[in-house]
Amino acid sequence: MAAIITSKFRLDSTNKFVESLSDNQFYMALGRPNAWTDDASPDTPYENDYANNTLWENMFAMKRVDAADIIHCTKRNLWVSGTTYIEYDDQDTNIEGKTYFVISDNNNVYMCLRAGAGASTYNPDTIGVQTSGVIGSVSTNDGYIWKYMYTVPATDVTKFLTASFMPCRKLYEQPSVGADAGLTAQWAVQGNAIDGAIYNLKITTAGVGYTAAPTITITGDGSSATATCTVSGGAINSITMTNIGTGYTHAKITLTTSGSSTAGTLRPVIGPPGGYGADPTSDLRAHYVTINTVFTGDESGSIPDTNDFRQIAVLKNPIEEDKDSATLSAVASMTVGNFYKILTMGTSSDAHWATAGSTSGNPVVGEVFKSIATTSTGSGTIAQIAEAAAYNACKSLITVTSGTYPADQLVEGTVGGGVAMVVEYVSGTGKLHYIQNEATGYTPITASDNLRFNGTAGGGDAITSVAVPLVNHHSGDVMFVENRTATTRADGQVETVRLVIAF
């Protein structure tokens, strides 16, 4: 049995992931301040519960991923003079593995509809933005024919363009007055796209013995496509489309004999539904997403910013601490516009919520919904999904000391014997953020303890309070994990975490 997962399936999954930001909360997380066994060679992450659990244990910061932080992307192929490119072919068995589109130094994106006889030497940017028609011809310059698709907007260049991937989007509404010129041009390209056009005929058999160029007839379920050809040495050597036509999903090409002893054969290359440029995410196989999250210092006091990290993750719908047992029937249990997850159900009506993301239309345990009213009916419990811009994911305590606790220092409680690793100590407040993992063990540090360096003697420093993390560990879904070498954070430093995820 032979089967494939199509590009459309991957693109549909990509679309659903991007669109799910409106029905869910996603966070980028930083963690693993402690070194790997070989710190130059990070451990390989595995898709199992153990990896998820240890991820939470080592996590210390989270930043919300907003709609403006994520975009479709596709492979970045820079146009370089002297490079041979592949023309788009609707019958190519591996078109996705070939370089049939490029981006220029001016961030203009072009699709190759017809390749020349050799390498490309004529930069399509010489003509540049052309929102209808094509650039080049079979008889001029290098013989390449390009279709201008879009220009990457300046903001997307800064935020999403990488050495290997470029942002790609379909526009669903006309850009506003004063919008980036690239968006305005792309809107025109989408509007001018021609459904079912035939921009190219491929020579499958050149024929033998032609004394004159044969007449080409194109028949099919579309209309108006016409073409001419030239012959050399009795064989067909060039095709020119004189009218690309419209509305074709299939077509047959017939040729007059024109003296040939062996007739040539041609086949059409039919454009995608909607036409080239109507949906660049489909045309360019953009079943990847780029996520860009910027961690700015301590995010206004929300997260630690003086320790390094070796692990990043994407989390879906983590739950806020102290909001995991609200009763559905309590008037103050919900805030309009916030997301909640149903933990248990009694008798309930869904009149008070919007079942965002629901497939059932009725509330079910485990479902995430957005509150549309503060009152509710029925009974059961709900948990509030995290909604703040950033969260400190560490445990914390307040200690009274005139000294300091360096990052990565192991500390212990003098009474219970609990051990922890310092993520950050804020001397002005006496607050110490810490994690506990396999290396430290999980014995709690409590307010009954005094705090000292692990393995030392002495009375230690008094602990006045201990607090759990601001988000429930092991809540929500782990969507992505990457282990890496250490990235050092410093007070006030800005880190940009840019991920590309393939679907």
Image (cartoon, rainbow, N blue to C red):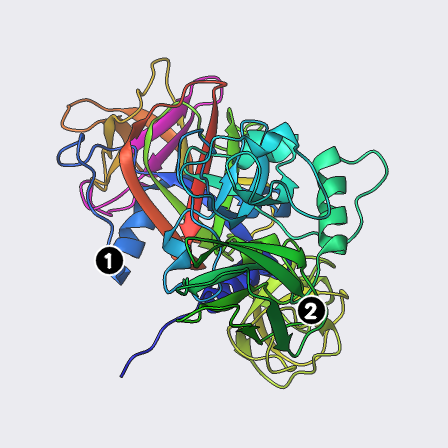
Q: Residues within 10 Å of mark 1 (few under 14, many from 20)?
A: few
The answer to whether residue 363 of the structure is visible from this angle is: yes
Range covered by the magenta-colored residues: 421-448
Identity of the residue drawn at 54% across and 60% down: 212
Q: Considering only vertical position in the picture, is 172 above or below 379? A: above
Q: Main secondary structure of the magenta part?
A: loop
For the N terminus, the quadrant is bottom left
Q: Rounded to the nearest whole Å, what is the CA distance between mark 1 and mark 2? A: 37 Å
Query: Which quarter of the picture shows residue 308?
Result: top left
Identity of the residue drawn at 65% across and 46% down: 134
- x then y, percent, for residue 502: 41, 53
Identity of the residue drawn at 56% across and 52% down: 386
- Who comes first in sequence, dot 1 or dot 2? 1
Query: Which quarter of the picture shows residue 332?
Result: bottom right
Identity of the residue drawn at 38% across and 26% down: 424
The residue most toward the right is 177
- x then y, percent, for residue 162: 46, 34
- Is residue 242 in the magenta section? no
Q: Residues within 10 Å of mark 2 (few under 14, many from 20)?
A: some
| Foreground residue among 496 and 273 | 273
Query: Which quarter of the picture shows residue 199?
Result: bottom right
- x then y, percent, for residue 53: 29, 55
The answer to whether residue 394 of the structure is visible from this angle is: no
For the C terminus, the quadrant is bottom left
Residue marked by disc 1: 50
Q: Secondary structure at mark 1?
A: helix
The kind of residue tagged 2 is Ala
Residue marked by disc 2: 330
The residue most toward the bottom is 347
The kind of residue tagged 1 is Tyr
Q: Considering only vertical position in the picture, is 151 above or below 9? A: above
- x then y, percent, for residue 419: 22, 37
